[in-house]
Amino acid sequence: MGVGKMAAPAAASSGAPGASGSRGRLRGGGVRRRCQWLIYWVPVLFICTILAWSYYAYVAQLCLLTMANIGEKVVCLLAYHLFFIMFLWSYWKTIFTLPMNPSKEFHLNYADKELLEREPRSETHQEVLRRAARDLPIYTRTMSGAIRYCDRCQLVKPDRCHHCSVCDKCILKMDHHCPWVNNCVGFSNYKFFLLFLAYSLLYCLFIVATDLQYFIRFWTNGLPDTQAKFHIMFLFFAAAMFSVSLSSLFGYHCWLVSKNKSTLEAFRAPIFRHGTDKNGFSLGFSKNFRQVFGDEKKYWLLPVFTSPGDGCSFPTCLVSQDPEQASTPAGISSSGRNENNHNFPAKPLRDSQSHLLTDPQSWTETSASIEKSKLGMSNPALTIENET
Ligand SMILES: [Zn+2]
Ligand SMILES: [Zn+2]
């Protein structure tokens, strides 16, 4: 996971001149990929090492060897293990939950791919994309008003989907690529990532709160100068330091959840057919929260997948669209609107639309309208923009 594609040299026959050079480059590419793979895991290894040491320092050095009161010892050990397990569970799920990619409906078929390769950047190119996107529940556009297309993955990008240059894939509702989990944070694991932040913050705050009195007693010579002193003091500093950075990151993501924004959308507001709308996906605090955590309260605190929908389409807060702008991307002349009006649902989605892709009746189009769509094949709005 997380290894970028390397430029593969062209295949050469075994007897051809330069074959050994190609094999050498292939071997070199393989070594480089393995090195990259190892480097990507270093931050995860760093966190695991700190976590393992903190377990030893807290359980062995602080609880078992330093705490004298048996009641305090039991309570601290029980509470510590609860936070520790929840932290590890959510961290594990964030790391090892594969990011979700767009479903096959968003991929171009073989004939369209051939057409695009034969005639790149032509009117045919634009028409192919418009035809491919016609039955898809897509509301966002590129800055130039074109249909969002990934020429790397050769697919029409669903709303909120972005191409990750590290994973070299399009990731549904991509938030960001996180080196600390060596994974893309997106639709499939955003809830796990939030819980990971919450439980790691609680873990650090709990250590700070219970370690504080022993930390002070070591400084004031209230306890003997043993090996435990080093562990308890360093444990306090590390937990306090991580608490500060985690609380700011967790606070930021709480704000993003409350506004139903991804990190990428906070930096660049999504562009809809009627223009840019930074709160286009916001449905109000309660619904925004449930878009990530689901409706069942009993699962809210557990790293179990409960986010509604399929990750390809999302409800928006847009009530209705101006018919003048319904098919007119921001900043584009509306001259081609009649040809395009039928291409997309006139009303934005209000509820989770996971059923749309399995219900072809929802977006049925007559052959007459298909013929009409061909009239709009030269629409200058439909240029390709490769977003990464
Ligand atoms: Zn892509
Ligand atoms: Zn990624």
Image (cartoon, rainbow, N blue to C red):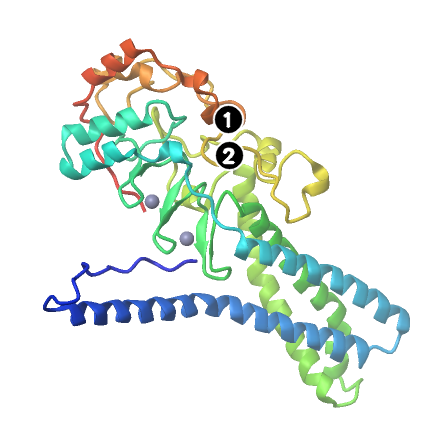
Task: For mark 1, give the secondary structure.
Answer: loop
Q: Amino acid at mark 2?
A: Asp
Q: Amino acid at mark 1?
A: Gln
Q: Quadrant of residue 79?
A: bottom right
Q: Is residue 360 visible?
A: yes
> In percent of the image, x 23 and y 28: which residue is there?
128
For mark 1, what is the residue? 353
Percent across and percent down for residue 130 are 27, 26
In the image, is residue 45 above or below residue 371? below
> In percent of the image, x 34 and y 53: which residue is there?
165
> In percent of the image, x 63 and y 54: which residue is there?
198
Which of these two is toward me, 263 or 216? Answer: 263
Task: Give the Cα separation between the discs numbered 2 and 1.
Answer: 8 Å
In the image, is residue 377 above or below residue 152? above
Give the total number of marks visible in the rendering.
Answer: 2
Task: For mark 2, give the secondary structure.
Answer: loop
In the image, is residue 127 above or below residue 89? above
Give yes or no for contact between labels 2 and 1 (Cβ–Cβ under 8 Å): yes
For mark 2, what is the residue? 310
Q: Quadrant of residue 335?
A: top left
Q: Residues within 10 Å of mark 1 (few under 14, many from 20)?
A: some
Label number found at residue 332: none
> In percent of the image, x 75 and y 64: which residue is there?
80
Which of these two is toward me, 25 or 161? Answer: 25
